[in-house]
Amino acid sequence: LYQYFKENMHQGRIQKGMKLPSKRLLASQLSISQTTVERAYEQLAAEGYIVSKPRSGWFADYNDSDFVHSKMPSTSPIRKAQENKQWIDFHYGNVDSSHFPFSAWRKSMVNSLDQYGHELYRSGNALGELELRTLIAEYLYQSRGVNCLPEQVIIGAGNPVLLQILCQVFEPNISIGYEDPGFPRSREIFEANRMNILPIPVDDEGICIQKIQEQQPNLVYVTPSHQFTLGTIMTINRRMQLLKWAAENQSFIIEDDYDGEFRYTGQPIPSLQGLDQHNRVIYMGTFSKSLLPSLRISYMILPSPLLKKGHEITSLYKQTVSCH
């Protein structure tokens, strides 16, 4: 109602000095309460659009000629033609919203609130809800060959948050071998935590083991199922060499499996973690690609040597993802 009067005064349909309907009459005509009309009139009066005259009523007090208004330019034919085109978004961080089962998702959310609404008032487990961590552990074993228990799973609001937690698990100033080229955001997080970045080249089989052996980093960050940005898949020989190196040097491997579930031909590539026999792989995954980026739900699988320290650091952050 406030916006209606305001626009009509700007457009000259309500002239200065014109009397407005009484609050009772306007409320009756629009089938709304007098309080609503009163609040609209009071806001207009506060901004100088109308004035109240005793025993006479409300009057428009706005003169459009006193103000200079810039008009929005009309949409050009070129812009209209561009808007009519069909665009395909190739950005790696986005998903096709038209294929998301919104109705099923909404129904599941409502059912969840009906069943567990009484638990809305608790803060939740610092590692993430046990039910979700159990399902993740079962799902990863079936789909990616990951071997883990629910207590090894830590849920976080996206991989950057989990990487931040992981950086606190290790001592400062340690060296990390990083794929070159590689995912820039993860590298920036490591740099912000004062890790010593050692660029390791990538060839058509994956990260170069010889360069790792020369540099001898404490950690190695890899994307073996779909190398970012080249898209190559690390061969089984290269995977076994990397695992052997980590075991011999008591180093750890961060396996970022950001979209390892997506394969256009054949089955998904088994995870590096599933091949690990010495508890040297930290596995990371996300629901941003398979569900929605806006959910901000990712997970990290810690090997047993890092569990105690990992739980201590995670408890400081509490739970970064809503338990509902």
Image (cartoon, helix red, strand yellow):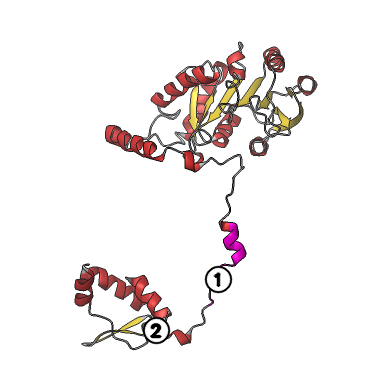
Within-10-Å neighbours for mark 1: few <14, some 14–19, many 20+ = few
The residue to which callout 1 is attached is: 74
The residue labelled by disc 2 is 62
Q: Where is residue 4 in the image (x, y as percent from the top left)?
A: 35, 72
* 97 sits to left or right of 26: right
Q: What element carries label 1?
A: loop
Q: Which amino acid does label 2 sit on?
A: Tyr
The question of residue 81 being in magenta is answered with yes
In x, y percent, where is residue 28?
Answer: 19, 72
| Above or below, 184 relative to 4 | above
Question: Any mark on residue 44, and which?
Answer: none
Q: Which of marks 2 and 1 is nearer the N terminus?
A: 2
Foreground residue among 127 and 300: 300
Res 233 quadrant in image: top right
**Which stretch appears magenta?**
70-82
Left or right of 136 in this view: 30:
left
Q: Which residue lies furthest to the top in this view?
A: 277
**Is residue 119 visible to us here?**
no
Q: For the N terminus, which image quadrant?
A: bottom left
In the image shown, does 256 or 31 lie closer to the viewer? Answer: 31
Whole-number angstrom distance, CA of label 2 to CA of label 1: 26 Å
Residue 7, quarter of the rendered image: bottom left
| Residue type for callout 1 | Ser
Q: Is residue 90 visible?
A: yes
Q: Is mark 2 on a helix, strand or loop?
A: loop
